[in-house]
């Protein structure tokens, strides 16, 4: 199996080979796992630079979501401890953005709950983004995550200073109906294509540990590869009491690292970003960056805690990365 991994690594790096679904499944089963991790790390070194970036989010509106995503604490259909908050004020958003700049964060995303952001909340979001840009200028890149929205709204986001839109596919197309039925995979895909048509970069990944198979994860990675997005966040499910997945069997550390490594084989030159659930790996997720990952989301997430910007900068530096500063 070691020869198989090395041969496939060589084909990816030197031959531009696109890993097939069957090849990816074989990689997942490879033994010992460290051989796979080391090969993924070498692909990352060959196909990506040693520059990394730290992204953080602003939880701009929380809870009371109409959708039934089975993993999410913010759905109004589940009985969770998530508190509902209204739309953030522009002044507060700008202050949080300034703090992120001080902490050497290079990207920050304004994130809201709900199927889509509309009406006065959307107008407030635009005002937030304008304030953030006025206060921080070119010191930080602005991103947004407002759900399934139209091309017209995406154009307005770009005009307000947004350079990248975040919209996960979450899981493979075949498994998606098992985690959400209030909107479709196709609707998510259309939002991604709308954002690209508007000239926005894309941050698009998913969640592992939802009960999906390895094949479902590979389907997700192949879809993202074809979309040629700039950033691919990999989240690991944290089962939340009150959600349908509160008793989900948590996947092992090795399975998480295998997934990151296989994603690197499938997407040799794209940014693979460790997101929620990194703490499950221990040591601040250090091993993920020796198994194919090359970026991260730092700070707290929407309803779960994360790591500090300083700890993440120190870790990346110790691994030889130069963190981007705008």
Image (cartoon, helix red, strand yellow):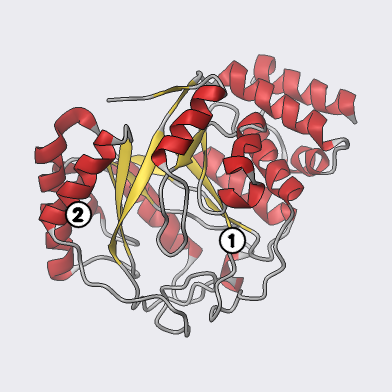
Q: Give the label on residue 237, or none.
A: 1
Mark 2 lies on a secondary structure that is helix
Image coords of residue 261 (percent x, y): 68, 36
Residue 17 seen anywhere in this rendered image of the structure: no
Q: Residue at x 61, y 16 (%)?
A: 46
Residue 67 seen anywhere in this rendered image of the structure: yes
Q: Which residue is mark 2?
A: 152
Q: Give the left or right position of residue 172, taking residue 145 as reference.
A: right
- Quadrant position of the C terminus in the picture: top left
Q: Give the left or right position of residue 174, taking residue 20 as reference.
A: left
From the viewer's side, name the closer residue of 109 and 176.
109
From the viewer's side, name the closer residue of 117 and 260.
260
Image coords of residue 148 (percent x, y): 34, 62
Q: Classify residue 30 by image quadrant.
A: top right
Compare marks 1 and 2 and give the one earlier in the sequence: 2
Image coords of residue 231 (percent x, y): 45, 38
From the viewer's side, name the closer residue of 197 and 172.
172
Q: Nearer the viewer, mark 1 or mark 2?
A: 1
User: Is residue 282 positioned above or below 249 on the image?
Assistant: above
Dot 2: few (<14), some (14–19), or many (≥20) neighbours within 10 Å? few
Q: Residue at x 83, y 40 (%)?
A: 26
Mark 1 lies on a secondary structure that is loop
- Quadrant position of the N terminus in the picture: top right
Image coords of residue 131 (percent x, y): 10, 47
């Amino acid at each position: 199996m070691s020869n198989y991994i090395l041969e496939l690594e060589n084909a990816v790096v030197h031959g531009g080979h696109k890993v097939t679904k069957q090849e990816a499944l074989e990689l997942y089963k490879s033994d010992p796992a460290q051989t796979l991790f080391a090969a993924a790390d070498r692909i990352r070194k060959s196909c990506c630079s040693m520059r990394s970036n730290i992204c953080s989010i602003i939880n701009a509106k929380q809870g009371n979501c109409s959708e039934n995503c089975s993993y999410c604490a913010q759905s109004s259909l589940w009985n969770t401890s998530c508190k509902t908050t209204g739309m953030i004020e522009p002044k507060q958003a700008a202050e949080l953005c300034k703090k992120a700049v001080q902490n050497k964060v290079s990207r920050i995303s304004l994130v809201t709950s709900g199927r889509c952001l509309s009406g006065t909340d959307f107008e407030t979001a635009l005002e937030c983004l304008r304030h953030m840009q006025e206060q921080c200028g070119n010191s930080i890149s602005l991103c947004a995550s407002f759900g399934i929205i139209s091309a017209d709204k995406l154009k307005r986001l770009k005009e307000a200073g947004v350079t990248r839109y975040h919209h996960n596919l979450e899981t493979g197309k075949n498994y998606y109906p098992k985690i959400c039925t209030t909107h479709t995979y196709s609707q998510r895909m259309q939002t991604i294509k709308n954002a690209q048509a508007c000239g926005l970069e894309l941050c698009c990944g998913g969640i592992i540990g939802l009960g999906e198979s390895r094949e479902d994860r590979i389907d997700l990675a192949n879809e993202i590869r074809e979309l040629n997005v700039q950033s691919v966040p990999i989240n690991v499910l944290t089962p939340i009491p009150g959600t349908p997945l509160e008793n989900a069997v948590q996947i092992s550390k090795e399975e998480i690292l295998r997934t990151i490594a296989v994603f690197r084989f499938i997407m040799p030159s794209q940014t693979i970003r460790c997101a929620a659930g990194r703490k499950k790996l221990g040591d601040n997720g250090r091993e993920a960056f020796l198994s194919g990952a090359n970026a991260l989301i730092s700070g707290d997430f929407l309803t779960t805690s994360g790591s500090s910007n300083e700890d993440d900068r120190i870790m990346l530096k110790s691994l030889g990365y130069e963190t981007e500063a705008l």
